[in-house]
């Protein structure tokens, strides 16, 4: 394992037809760092995340995790290397209980493409059980462990999604708009959850988020994308007053 950044993109480009969604992005995330990616609609934030998780193939450039290129890997292999993604993905199995969902997530990270054979053995795998239990406790769902996931209220489902991502015990957690569609109360409790996990697990994360209050409260560093390019990066204080950032958001939100 190298002593360089945990995650590094090098000249990363993604084109869709004639549209350049990611334009020569050089992103670097140190272990233990919390980085938020912001930018107006269509700036390329989700594309960048999907490139890192290998849901999309880059047109050019490289992505290194722990010093090794991951561009040739399948999505599940990236998870096994230690990258988890939460939100905006249908990661929950609705017919299974909350606990089973968390256990499957830890199994999947351990074993890669999982099959039913792992499910039948899950009760013997105490490490998997313990990690799932600990994770449900972290996300405040332990008392609902035996509930079918489909029966959870919306906010709890989103917490379970975080739990599923954490149950893989990731070195890097990617979060794409964790509070989208949430009520103010659910948003508040998700922010508290992210802050607690940040504190207790010392997790490295990359967050895509429109809500500036959240971004400014949880980030060590903010990277601003506009039309696929990084136009600014810095601490929350540096970004708040940056004229290029204000310009990119003109007509959009005040930050
Ligand atoms: N699969 C795709 N095929 C074609 N164009 C795409 C595809 N995915 C994204 N795009 C385009 O790439 C650009 C960047 O989109 P992306 O979703 O990454 O932006 P974003 O910053 O996440 O936006 P938002 O804040 O609205 O979610 C947009 O112009 C979008 O229309």
Image (cartoon, rainbow, N blue to C red):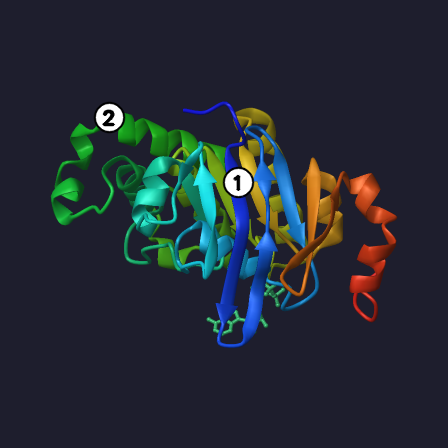
Q: Is residue 218 above or below residue 73?
A: above
Residue at position x 32%, y 48% in the image: 73
| Foreground pick, 4 / 137 | 4
Label whose residue precedes the other's in the sequence (2 or 1): 1
User: Residue 5, image x and y in percent?
Assistant: 54, 31
Residue at position x 41%, y 29% in the image: 134
In the picture, the quarter occupied by the C terminus is bottom right
Q: CA distance from mark 2 to mark 1?
A: 35 Å
Question: Residue beneath label 1, please?
Answer: 8
In the picture, the quarter occupied by the N terminus is top left
Question: Residue beneath label 2, please?
Answer: 126
Q: Mark 2 falls on what kind of element?
A: helix
Residue 206: quadrant of the picture = top right
Q: Mark 1 falls on what kind of element?
A: strand
Residue lying at the far bottom of the rendered structure? 18
Horizontal side of residue 240 vs 37, given as left or right: right
Q: Quadrant of ligand 1?
A: bottom right
Badge 1 local density, few (<14 within 10 Å), some, or many (20+)?
Answer: many
**Mark 2: is the Cβ under 8 angstroms from ligand 1?**
no
User: Residue 88, image x and y in percent?
Assistant: 48, 59
């Amino acid at each position: 394992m190298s002593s360089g950044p945990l995650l590094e993109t090098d000249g990363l480009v993604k084109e869709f037809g004639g549209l350049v969604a990611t334009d020569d992005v050089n992103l670097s995330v140190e272990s233990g760092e919390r980085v938020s990616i912001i930018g107006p609609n269509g700036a390329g934030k989700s594309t960048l995340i999907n490139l890192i998780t290998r849901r999309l193939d880059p047109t050019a450039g490289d992505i290194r995790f722990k010093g090794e290129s991951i561009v040739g890997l399948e999505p599940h292999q990236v998870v096994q290397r230690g990258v988890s993604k939460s939100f905006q993905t249908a990661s929950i199995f609705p017919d299974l209980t909350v606990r089973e969902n968390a256990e499957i997530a830890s199994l999947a990270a351990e074993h890669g493409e999982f099959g039913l054979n792992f499910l039948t053995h899950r009760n013997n795998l105490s490490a998997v059980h313990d990690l799932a239990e600990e994770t449900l406790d972290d996300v405040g769902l332990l008392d609902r462990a035996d509930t079918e996931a489909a029966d959870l209220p919306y906010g709890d489902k989103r917490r379970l999604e975080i739990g599923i991502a954490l149950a893989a015990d990731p070195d890097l957690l990617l979060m794409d708009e964790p509070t989208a569609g949430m009520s103010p109360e659910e948003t508040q409790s998700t922010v508290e959850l992210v802050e607690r996990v940040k504190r207790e697990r010392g997790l490295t994360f990359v967050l895509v988020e429109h809500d500036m209050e959240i971004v400014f409260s949880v980030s060590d560093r903010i990277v601003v994308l506009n039309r696929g390019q990084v136009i600014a990066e810095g601490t929350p204080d540096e970004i708040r007053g940056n004229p290029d950032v204000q310009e990119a958001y003109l007509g959009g939100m005040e930050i």
